Image (cartoon, rainbow, N blue to C red):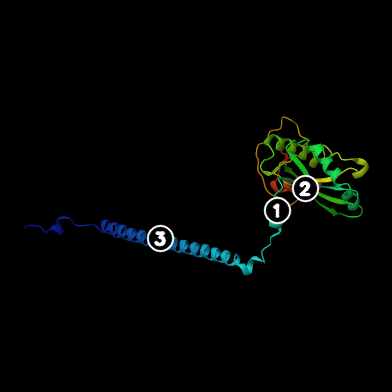
Amino acid sequence: MGKSEDDEFPLSSIEAASIIESNRSRRENRVCFCNYLIRLINLKCILALLLGISVFISAIFWLPPFLKLYDHGDKDLDSQYTGHAIVASFKLQKPVSLVKDNVMQLEADIYDEIESANAKVVIISLERSGLNSTYVVFAINSLSERSQISLTELSLIESYFGLFVTGDAKLLLTTSLFGEPSAFEVLKFPGGITIIPREDVYPLQNVQISFNFTLNNSIHQIQDNINALYDQLGSGLHLTRQEVILL
């Protein structure tokens, strides 16, 4: 007698179980993939919603009723120096009245220090800073609105200012009138200005890792607290005895 097709290829219990398990795995994989897509879509929706809310809130606070609540401190500071190419300041241990009476001589003294043929010095403000002390803010501008201070002159002024800030050189004024200036600071400079402090390190020491960060302090504040800055950086970076920090 002949055999049916089912009788010709009988499946053992092990093979049947293997097929069932394989089908189950494929179903589970499809379910897992679907769940992954759902979670991914939900995550994207949430991120898009948060982004939309943040943009909406930002737009609200830029509306006129809220603009007056915005802190314009930095903007106001820049607006004071609009039209001036370079701005710096220092202190004199002289009363404001005396400095005002000799403001033209002060401008001439500062100009003699920068030695820029295409620039002029303008005193922007004189403010009282303690007893018999004057805070002087001055600008260095080009001689005419149609011209600019050359890159060579800017480089020279930058080098002078760097020496004045670090104290490696002094701004020489008429001593009999103004005494010796102190606390020299650069308030505005095209492209910014870099001050390199003195370092007591061996010349063979090489820089292995470099990084930068911003401090909302003046250069003089940082200089006055430079040791504390070194200590905090060393502690935060967990330096070994063989490692040093160079600023």
Given contact means CB atoms under 8 Å apart, are the residues at marks 3 and 1 in contact? Answer: no
Instruction: Please tell me the numbered disc located at residue 222.
Output: 2
Comparing labels 3 and 1, the label whose residue is closer to the camera: 1
Residue density around tag 1, few if under 14, some if 14–19, many if 20 or more, within 10 Å: few
Residue 30 x, y percent position in the rendering: 35, 60
Name the residue located 78 percent from the left edge and 46 percent from the top edge.
122
For mark 3, what is the residue?
A: 37
Foreground residue among 190 and 10: 190
If the image is split into quadrants, where does the C terminus sit? top right
Report whether 106 appears left or right of 243: right
Q: Amino acid at mark 2?
A: Ile
Q: Amino acid at mark 3?
A: Leu
Q: Secondary structure at mark 3?
A: helix
Q: Earlier in the sequence, mark 2 or mark 1?
A: 1
Residue 24 sits in quarter: bottom left
Q: Amino acid at mark 1?
A: Asp
Name the residue located 66 percent from the left edge and 45 percent from the top edge.
212
Alpha-carbon span between mark 3 and mark 2? 52 Å
Q: What is the number of callouts on the image?
A: 3
Instruction: Please tell me the numbered disc located at residue 78.
Output: 1
Residue 54 sits in quarter: bottom right
Instruction: Please tell me the numbered disc located at residue 117.
Output: none
Alpha-carbon span between mark 2 and mark 1? 22 Å
Name the residue located 51 percent from the left edge and 64 percent from the top edge.
52
Residue 98 x, y percent position in the rendering: 91, 50
Residue projecting furthest to the top: 204
